[in-house]
Amino acid sequence: MNRNYAKPAAFLAAGFIATLAAVTVQKAYATTTVANASKTTLSSPGGGNSVTIGVAAINSPVMLAATQVDVGFRGTSSATILSATASPALMQWVALSAGPSTAVVSSFTTGAGVTMFNTGWNATTQLATSGVTSFHIHNSSTSTKTVVVMQVW
């Protein structure tokens, strides 16, 4: 290659690579935007239940993450939930349960009060059904616990 063209060619190639990188990064950023997401902080008294919250989308898959944020009890879990209303109505889930004996759990129910999975490290908080379209946090400890729940659909 003629030396008169080597330097401009290198600058053109570097510019092309920088432009390609910028376009790729922008596309990757744009795909992370989630319009259908909710975040709810639930507080549950010792030995009690939190308020009930609804499954974000009915008859559609919902990704859920639940994280207990109390110091000394922190833990996180995740699940895919289906709340189906066609007869027979039911709630079905597959989850990675939090705790020292982390396990994959999968089940379904047609009623309320069924423990779905642990949300904290020491298994004192659990996500439980309140029916086929809603759930709550159950706290089996003696002190108030806080769990943050995110749903994406």
Image (cartoon, helix red, strand yellow):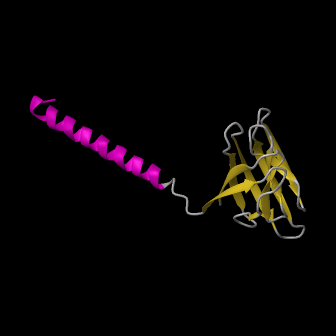
Q: Quadrant of the C terminus?
A: bottom right
Point out residue 124 in the picture as x, y percentages from the top left corner: 80, 43
Between residue 81 and residue 41, name the one nearer to us.
41
Point out residue 151 in the picture as x, y percentages from the top left corner: 66, 57
For the stretch drawn in magenta, what is the main secondary structure?
A: helix
**In this rendering, does residue 65 appear at all?**
no
Q: Which residues are magenta?
A: 1-30
Is 77 one of the magenta-colored residues? Answer: no
Q: Residue furthest bottom?
A: 86
Between residue 73 and residue 98, name the one nearer to us.
73
> Quarter-wise, where is residue 118 in the image?
top right
Q: Tell me if 73 is positioned left or right of 112 in this view.
A: left
Q: Residue at x 82, y 45 (%)?
A: 142
Q: Quadrant of the N terminus?
A: top left
Q: Residue furthest left?
A: 4
In this view, 2 is above or below 59: above
Point out residue 26 in the picture as x, y percentages from the top left corner: 40, 51
> Quarter-wise, where is residue 105 in the image?
top right
Q: Tell me if 71 is positioned left or right of 32 in this view.
A: right
**In this rendering, does residue 87 appear at all?**
yes
Between residue 30 and residue 142, name the one nearer to us.
142
